[in-house]
Amino acid sequence: MNVNVRSMCRFLLPLLLVAGRSGFSKIEPWIKPYERARLADPIMSLDMNPVSSAYMQHVYEAREGSRGAEGSAGGGCGCN
């Protein structure tokens, strides 16, 4: 049992030291500023139909406006 603990400590100690050291490293963005335009492309969105989703979001906000579900101003009638 004692040999198992030592062998496990030999493996875990360097692993913990490397993991702890990585927490102090400088965070650098891996996406360059000139590559960000590709990510802003509409084809990269998760929504299949953005026009329909925007309309449904507007309807939802109008219906829930009196309760403040989405934080938009206006009443429940949709007349903002």
Image (cartoon, rainbow, N blue to C red):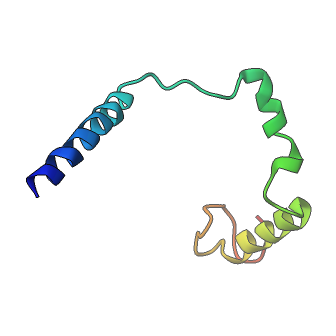
Instruction: Farthest residue to the left: give it.
Output: 2
Quadrant showing the N terminus: bottom left
**Left or right, 37 with reference to 9:** right
Residue at 23% in and 38% down: 13
Q: Looking at the picture, tell me which residue is in the foreground, 20 or 51.
A: 20
Left/right of residue 24 with respect to residue 48 in the rendered view = left
Is residue 30 placed above or below 7 in the rendered structure? above
Q: Residue at x 64, y 28 (%)?
A: 30
Q: Position of residue 28 (x, y in %)?
A: 55, 24
Q: Is residue 79 visible?
A: no
Instruction: Say which quarter of the image contains residue 55.
Output: bottom right
Q: Is residue 75 left or right of residue 67?
A: right
Answer with left or right where residue 25 lies relative to residue 48: left
**Residue at the (41%, 24%) spot, across then down:** 25
Q: Could you say where residue 80 lies in the image, as x and y percent from the top left?
A: 76, 64
Q: Nearer the viewer, residue 29 or 56?
A: 29
Foreground residue among 77 and 37: 37
Q: Is residue 44 above or below residue 72?
A: above
| Residue 48 position in % (x across, y down) | 87, 63
Whether residue 67 is visible here, answered yes or no, is yes
